[in-house]
Amino acid sequence: MKTHVLIEQFDGDPAIFVQDDSTKIEGVIPRDLAAAARAAVADGAERIELCGGMSVELATEVIAAVGPSVEVRLNRYDYGSLELAAAYKEAYASGESIDAAFFYKASSTTELRRVDFIGLVAGVADLSDLKARAREARAAGARMYELYAGWGIEAAALLRSLDSEPSPVGFID
């Protein structure tokens, strides 16, 4: 399945920062979200995944823009992550620099790298590599994780269990 992930970006030029055979991840300014989703479908996306910072109202706009033939999913947080995610959101809104780590399922694991407007990013091939990259991200300062393109509940549970100080974990259900 060809998945296109749209991550909210508030400044700078929107950019595609991951592109492989099955996954494309793109930063997009929220006002341009519907147009970006239509472009993703025109490019062959069968599934669109939206960043956890996007609202259900924005997700509804994307569904209306692309129609019923494309699956649209919104990254969500489990109940145990809600307070942690809210604290992260408040810190981010106040200008505090807190890293997040974004992991997507890939055929082979990639290096963890920094993308200016979102934080740390890596493709991971299996749960063992996910665990290793998450520990690397935590050591680099990540305090929140989001999972995309095939990583769901099992991977989220793994990440929640890694640290003595839990981090919020968003995932696609």
Image: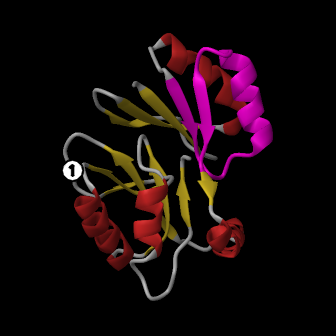
Q: Quadrant of residue 67?
A: top right
Q: Is residue 51 left or right of residue 113?
A: right
Q: Is residue 123 left or right of residue 45?
A: left
The residue to which callout 1 is attached is: 109
Q: Is residue 51 left or right of residue 129?
A: right
For the point 60% across and 37% down, which residue is it?
73
Q: In the rendered view, tell whether residue 153 sits above or below residue 106.
A: below
Residue 101 or residue 48, whichever sits in front:
48
Q: In the rendered view, tell whether residue 35 sits above or below residue 128.
A: above
Residue 47 or residue 4, whichever sits in front:
47
For the point 34% across and 68% down, which residue is it?
134
Q: Does residue 55 show up magenta in the picture?
A: yes
Q: In the rendered view, tell whether residue 44 sits above or below residue 90.
A: above
Q: In the rendered view, tell whether residue 65 sits above or below residue 86.
A: above
Q: Does residue 135 show up magenta in the picture?
A: no
Q: What colour scheme has been applied to the protein in the rendered image?
A: secondary structure
* Residue 101 seen from this side: no
Instruction: Assess disc 1: are there few (<14), some (14-19) or many (≥20) residues with their C-alpha within 10 Å of its C-alpha.
Output: some
Give the x, y percent position of residue 19: 33, 32
Say which element carries label 1: loop
* Residue 128 seen from this side: yes
Residue 40 or residue 94, whichever sits in front:
40
Task: Report the span colored magenta.
Answer: 47-75
The residue type indicated by label 1 comes to Thr
Give the x, y percent position of residue 133: 28, 64
Extreme-bottom residue of the structure: 164
Extreme-top residue of the structure: 42
